[in-house]
Image (cartoon, grey):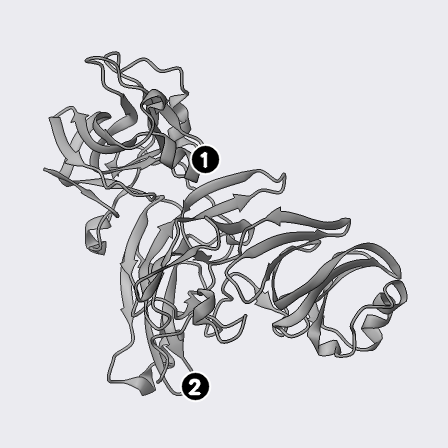
Amino acid sequence: MARGATHIGFNLDALDGLHALAGSVEIPKWSAVTNSDARTVRDDDLDTAWTCKAEHERPCAIGIHFAAPAEVKAVRLTNASYTKAFGEHSRVTEVRLHTDAGYLDAEVPDLQDFAYVVLGKQVPTRSIIVEVTKTAGGREKLGLAVADLEIYGSGGTAREPLIIDPVRTVIESKGGGWTKTNDEWTRAPSFLVTIGKDGKRTRLMPATAIYGAAGDRLLLVENLSATSCTRHDGLFFAFDRDTRLLAPLGALGGMGGEVFRQREGIGFVHGYADDLTAHLAGVVLEEEKLKHRRTQRLSDTEGPQSFGQWNVDPAPLDRGGALIRRPPEGCRPASDDALQPLVAVDPKADVARPGEWMICELGASRRALLSDHGACGDSWQMTVLDGGRLVATAGKKRKGSRLRVRRIDGTTLWVELGDGGDGTELFEITPTGITLQGTLSLAALPPAPCRKRCDDPFANPMAPK
């Protein structure tokens, strides 16, 4: 028995021992002929895809021959997820899985997201072939497009870890990201994209935010689907770097809370905490097993103690980046004296209120000066100075201007520019200049109608009323 699913399953105990299986991609001889490179389904980039057009009595099929005998539990098969390809190519909706033990038929969820086929029990095999038996949509002459094929199981040989540095990730979505439907706002498909030091972009997975630090084994992935402003729908996933497994965690008490990191990089808790109370839910990796962690509902006084017991940092993580009033590492609030070099090169700069400015060191004598004149001011400005010399500057009037800043390294900043609407732009600031990276965000924002101010976060459902 096999069934289609949108994730691998909520039962964490059932995920013990599972990992992504290593193997070589193969196209069976009886498959339709294709000139497309099938190896793209294993390159961890949803912007690339294997394409195939079924022929008379020759279906499209693709498989993995494992490096060593394994027991298969689930197949993750992802239709081409970038917007244009998703609409133009046929999408896989039913498959037949061929293993050494025979075959299993299953439907595949038709959505712009990861899709799974989960087997009722693990099947021992040296290979697995996915035969596409039904598709939907798309232009017939283009055929189907598969962006990702991952096989999960036990035994065999595990794939190499997938290293993700959250600092170098952004969120990309269609338009502003939100559409009004009845009494709530629906989130457009959104994806986690990495931007390498060389500028190369890789679309990794569906997401609206990611939490963690470089080198952490577990990262927390958020994927919001809708919000009513006070209630948020979606799922959290624990991403295990070593096993490549995305374990669904549910809403962890209610999407939209603060996130706290386990100090060793092997877990998170989510919710609300102050000096007197804490309402938290999360997950931690113990002896290679994911374990839920929750505060007791009727024991508020013991809540804050949970941070120490779970070895969790009580300081919540920034959602995407830091606001001007909360400077990140290597940045500081400005003062009258510190803004004088800016006035010397730009006499029209609005420096009447130094507290509206942030100064970030970029190495040597270079620094960035940033302001949104509020937040939620009437204009924004970013300037790079080398001592008293102007290197680069950008800015304009924009009602409800709001900057969110992330330190990438000692010489680089990413700055998200937003306003009272849903659109955002991302700038990269280096010692040599200011470059627009596109309509990207550091993390998804609440819909504009859900914010009284331009910088309001999602309402925390676990906070005291």
The image quadrant that residue 234 belongs to is: bottom left
Q: Quadrant of the N terminus?
A: top left
Label 1: how many residues lie within 10 Å, few (<14), some (14-19) or many (20+)?
some
Q: Nearer the viewer, residue 183 or 434?
A: 183
Residue 218: x and y in percent read 40, 54
Residue to which mark 2 is pinned? 275
Q: Nearer the viewer, residue 324 or 167?
A: 324
Q: Earlier in the sequence, mark 1 or mark 2?
A: 1
Looking at numbered disc 1 in the image, what kind of residue is underneath it?
Asp
Residue 99: x and y in percent read 17, 26
Alpha carbons under labels 1 and 2: distance apart: 45 Å
Residue to which mark 1 is pinned? 47
Mark 1 and mark 2 in contact? Answer it, CB < 8 Å: no
Label 2: how many residues lie within 10 Å, few (<14), some (14-19) or many (20+)?
few
Residue 392: x and y in percent read 79, 53
Q: Nearer the viewer, residue 260 or 313?
A: 260
Q: Quadrant of the C terminus?
A: bottom left
Residue 384: x and y in percent read 78, 57
Q: Please tell me whether mark 2 sits on a helix, a strand or a loop.
A: loop
Q: Is residue 62 visible?
A: yes
Is residue 208 placed above or below 281 in the rendered structure? above
- Give the number of the disc on residue 393: none
- At 32% across and 37% down in the image, what residue appears? 78
